[in-house]
């Protein structure tokens, strides 16, 4: 007879990766349910994935491109903004769906045993589908505007992976802390709103005054946007050090988020 012993994680323990792999069906089911619930009883369904970045890019093009007349590196401003929103939406959506996932599934978390880390991880599935649909729209726009980024577009999956790791590190930690402190649900959207404008998403880094540029250059999201625009719309090659700093920061943030999750998981059932 096989006997399974369930032990609470330590404060600085990593997850049991084999246990997560064996429970991958749970990850798939959570992700599938998220997709169904999001688009059930909607009139246009998955088209919202395209409409949202299109609308945002349109507004940014008018405000920053036409009114403020900020530079876009020779790329049509609408395309420039859309490429930035493509990466930002992936980052923002992963955090949004993972940060409140434990609280929204509190009945399961408190009554059924399974690796809790799978709950915030499951939100990535729907984000990947959203990204794929929006990326097809980006390719269409590239043809319409006659922009050829060349071979760097093949690096897009790498930047998507880094985006997801950065967002998951924050989202996983936030999901664990939210179980005990619900203030995070109010605090996090506010921080993300600030980051949206504090990161060169709707404008180019070259538009930032020289005396303030260092503030933007210490932001890993700035490096990410530079990489994404180099790959998708043919912007200049980023600095060599960013190719090292960006994946390194993503790895650090991701595993730091997991450690925070492990730190709080011991008390989930008691406070959720």
Image: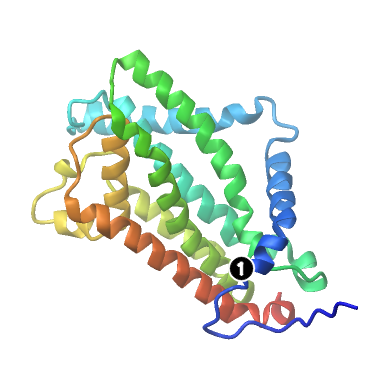
Please identify the residue farthest to the right as the structure is shown.
1
Q: Quadrant of residue 238?
A: top left
The residue identified by callout 1 is 17
Quadrant of the snapshot with the N terminus = bottom right
Residue 62 visible to an observer of this rendering: no
| Residue at the spot 22% in from the left edge and 39% down from the top edge | 204
x%, y% of residue 22?
Answer: 71, 62
| Residue at the spot 44% in from the left edge and 49% down from the top edge | 161
Vertical placement of residue 98 versus 85, above or below: below
x%, y% of residue 49?
Answer: 55, 33
Please identify the residue farthest to the left as the structure is shown.
210
Vertical placement of residue 19 versus 78, above or below: below
> What is the secondary structure assignment of the residue under circle 1?
helix
Q: Is residue 175 left or right of residue 109?
A: left
Nearest the camera: 110 or 5?
Answer: 5
Q: Is residue 211 left or right of residue 162?
A: left
| Residue at the spot 61% in from the left edge and 46% down from the top edge | 125
Residue 28 visible to an observer of this rendering: yes
Vertical placement of residue 266 versus 21, above or below: below
Crowding at label 1, few (<14), some or many (≥20) Cα neighbours within 10 Å?
A: few
Q: Quadrant of residue 244?
A: bottom left
x%, y% of residue 76?
Answer: 26, 23
Task: Describe the colour scheme in one phrase.
Answer: rainbow
Quadrant of the snapshot with the C terminus = bottom right
The total number of labels drawn is 1
| Residue at the spot 18% in from the left edge and 34% down from the top edge | 70
Vertical placement of residue 270 versus 185, above or below: below
Nearest the camera: 115 or 126?
Answer: 115
x%, y% of residue 232?
Answer: 32, 32
Q: Quadrant of residue 267?
A: bottom right
């Amino acid at each position: 007879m096989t006997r399974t012993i369930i032990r609470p994680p330590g404060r600085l323990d990593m997850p049991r990766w084999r246990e997560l792999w064996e429970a991958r069906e749970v990850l798939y089911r959570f992700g599938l349910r998220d997709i169904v619930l999001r688009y059930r009883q909607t009139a246009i369904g998955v088209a919202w994935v395209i409409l949202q970045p299109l609308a945002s890019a349109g507004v940014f093009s008018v405000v920053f491109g036409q009114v403020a007349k900020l530079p876009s590196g020779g790329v049509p401003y609408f395309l420039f903004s859309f490429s930035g929103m493509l990466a930002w939406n992936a980052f923002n959506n992963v955090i949004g769906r993972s940060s409140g996932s434990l609280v929204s599934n509190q009945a399961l978390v408190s009554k059924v045993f399974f690796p809790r880390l799978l709950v915030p991880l499951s939100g990535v599935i729907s984000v990947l589908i959203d990204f794929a649909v929006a990326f097809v729209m980006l390719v269409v726009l590239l043809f319409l505007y006659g922009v050829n980024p060349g071979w760097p577009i093949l690096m897009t999956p790498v930047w998507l992976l880094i985006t997801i790791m950065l967002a998951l590190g924050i989202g996983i930690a936030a999901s664990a802390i939210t179980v005990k402190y619900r203030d995070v649900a109010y605090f996090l959207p506010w921080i993300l709103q600030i980051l949206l404008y504090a990161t060169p998403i709707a404008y180019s880094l070259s538009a930032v005054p020289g005396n303030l540029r260092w503030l933007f250059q210490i932001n890993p999201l700035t490096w990410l946007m530079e990489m994404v625009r180099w790959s998708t719309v043919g912007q200049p090659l980023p600095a060599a050090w960013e190719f090292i700093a960006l994946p390194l920061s993503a790895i650090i943030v991701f595993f730091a988020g997991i450690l925070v999750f492990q730190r709080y998981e011991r008390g989930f059932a008691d406070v959720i």
